[in-house]
Amino acid sequence: MLTDKDLELLKFLTNETQMGKFKWQPTAIENQFTASLRGKYSVVMNKTQSGLVSLKLIDTNDQELVALTMLDSELVEQLYEFVRRKALDVDKVIDEIIKDQP
Amino acid sequence: MDLWTIIGTVASVAGLGLGIWVLVVAKDARRAAREMRAWARKRTLAEELQQAQQYIEQIGDFLHKKEWMAVRIRAQELMASCRECLTRWPDGLSEPRKDDVLSASRLVHSIADKAASPGAKDFKRIDLKRLSTTQLDAAGLISSALGEARNREERNGE
């Protein structure tokens, strides 16, 4: 169940990601990305083969603090798309392609 | 003196010698263990990160050899090492470098998860490439944290 605090977290992550404040990185698992916050927490975003997007907030002891899916809020899916673009440097790739056009 | 008395005397002398030797070896082993514990207590953050760096290099080596069990074991050791760095020296690194250590731990976690998957034997080239890239990313993150830890130690004259 999505709480107001969860929603605040989602909005915070979306804003900070858009501003490029988090270092999102692709993991060894396909369609999975991670970033760390405040030197204490990790966020892991995942998209399964069936297309279900999920977000987990984990502490240093591997304890799961928050677990949300796109079924809880559409912001989860939106955030995943921002994260994917940042982690894979999609905008940079597009710039590179456009630049090389005669 | 009959033969049995001679054999018995030699055996008891040999037994006494063996007992003394075992005592000496045990004392040495105990002293070594004590020194090891003391060294572990005195270990600095930079040394712990250095150990983590060795683990990630070994993971790279095991990935190359496709030794999945070894990858998982080293990954667990590395994750424990990262956790220790963050809990034992909470002020040892700046926030961005602590994030780096955490991210390295998460990346290695994903390597371990992938290595544990039932299809590990039949990984495609793309899977192996992703594993290798992730290992290199994690190595880079640990390296940057190690750099800062060493820098701080040098400044503090440790």
Image: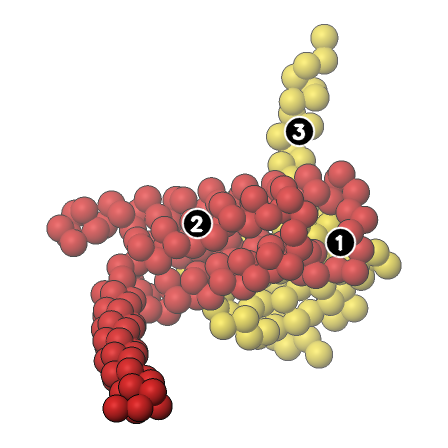
Q: Mark 2 points at which residue?
A: B54
Name the one closer to the observer, A75 or B57.
B57
Q: What residue type is labelled 1?
A: Ala
Q: Where is residue B6 in the image (x, y as percent from the top left)?
A: 29, 86
Point 24% across, 72% down: residue:
B28
Colour in which chain B is shown? red
- Asked whether residue B47 appears in the rendered view, the answer is yes
Q: Where is residue A97 in the image (x, y as percent from the top left)?
A: 70, 21
- Asked whether residue B19 appears in the rendered view, the answer is no
Does dot 1 land on a helix, a strand or a loop? helix
Does dot 3 land on a helix, a strand or a loop? helix
Q: Is B104 above or below relative to B65? A: below
Identify the chain of the residue marked 3, using the numbered disc in the image: A
| Spatial CA span between label 1 and label 3 | 31 Å
Colour in which chain A is shown? yellow
Q: Name the residue under label 3.
A: A93
Q: Residue B8 carries which label?
A: none
Camera-nearest label, 1 or 3:
1
Q: Mark 1 points at which residue?
A: B120
Identify the chain of the residue marked 2, using the numbered disc in the image: B
Q: Which amino acid does label 2 sit on?
A: Gln
